[in-house]
Image (cartoon, rainbow, N blue to C red):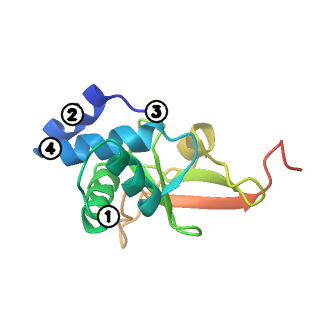
Amino acid sequence: MIDVAEAMSKCIQFGKSATQQRMAIIEELSNSKNSISAYDLLEQVQEKGYAYNISTIYRVLDFWIELGLAHKIESNNTYLVCNDSHHNHFHVLFHCLSCEKVEESCKLSKKAMFPNMKNFKPIENQVVELQGLCKNCF
């Protein structure tokens, strides 16, 4: 879970504006117990009285991913907040195929550092998704 102050601080750090749209969407994303689709996120913010469209949701989600505060789970096209204050490592997510729960492993993420390479510079904030069954489902 991320708080509003942390999100605003990240915006300031990157010289970006903490707009109402950005803050409303990161707050809803942060309050979600599991990963959430953009369409479900749209429904949640509309229930709170915001008149955003799906393009806005995707644009803002891309913004938070770029700032490192959110992740996209490619296999099911959902999103979740990053629970790791990170730098220079992959983000390792465990995705349960039975209950759809997704958890980030900070310990494993920190061990998976980017190698120091001369011919290639990997992009930071990359996600490695491991699919399987959580302890409640196996």
Q: Residue 44 placed where, x, y %?
A: 41, 48
Compared with 81, 99 (above or below) is below
Q: Nearer the viewer, residue 129 or 78?
A: 78
Q: Secondary structure at mark 4?
A: loop
Q: Check residue 8 in the rendering and tell me which mark sits there, or answer none.
A: 2
- Identify the residue position indicated by label 1 in the image: 58
Mark 1 or mark 3, whichever is nearer to me? 1
Mark 2 or mark 4, whichever is nearer to me? 4
- Identify the residue position indicated by label 4 in the image: 19
- Identify the residue position indicated by label 3 in the image: 1
Q: Amino acid at mark 4?
A: Thr
Q: Amino acid at mark 1?
A: Tyr
Q: Residue at x 56, y 46 (%)?
A: 109
Q: CA distance from mark 1 to mark 3?
A: 20 Å
Q: CA distance from mark 4 to mark 3?
A: 19 Å
Compared with 3, 36 (above or below) is below
Q: Earlier in the sequence, mark 4 or mark 1?
A: 4
Specify whether 90 is left or right of 19: right
Q: Residues within 10 Å of mark 1 (few under 14, many from 20)?
A: some
